[in-house]
Amino acid sequence: MNLPIGIFQREFAQRENLKCRVLWLSEKFHNLPLAAHPRVPVDVVAAVREAFAGMAKDAQGRKILEASAELVKQKPPFGFSPSDDSDYDNYRKFYKNTLLKGFSTE
């Protein structure tokens, strides 16, 4: 899912029956990535990537996605989408420029 932070917060609050007022919307951020260590062979990374990306199209995969979505009260669509490193540039930019102590990459 690729949402502005404020929308994500609002949806979480609604799901948990909490009050929330969005004061600002960020640019869109991808959800957390599934990442592989550089030592993992490229063919293994590709196979795992394809398995996750194809879960929504597979009967058993869809069943797992639906069960986990129910657990966290997530609405459709369910599944994973492939991304590349550049899709997370805005995270790096945020952490590089944040004013919060302990989070800056410098």
Image: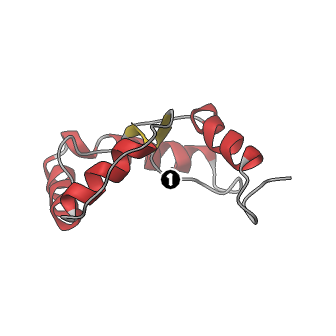
Residue at position x 30%, y 50% from top? 10
Look at the image and tell me in which quarter the N terminus lies.
Answer: top left
Q: Residue furthest right?
A: 106
Q: Is residue 1 visible?
A: yes
- Which type of secondary structure does the marked residue at label 1 adopt? loop
Please tell me how many numbered marks the rendered image carries. 1
Q: In this rendering, does residue 73 appear at all? A: no
**Image coordinates for residue 48, horizontal then vertical, percent:** 45, 50
User: Where does label 1 land, which residue?
Assistant: 34
Q: Nearer the viewer, residue 19 or 15?
A: 19
Where's residue 50, x and y in %?
A: 40, 41
Front one among 32 and 41 = 32
Q: Amino acid at mark 1?
A: Leu
Dot 1 crowding, Cα within 10 Å, few <14, some 14–19, many 20+: few
Question: Residue shown at 71%/57% (left/top)?
Answer: 39
- The answer to whether residue 68 is left or right of residue 9 is left
* Camera-nearest residue between 91 and 16: 16
Q: Examine the rendered structure and indicate whether residue 79 appears above or below residue 65.
A: above
Q: Is residue 79 above or below residue 104?
A: above
Residue placed most toward the observer, 64 or 24: 24
Residue drawn where x is 66% and y is 57% of the image? 37
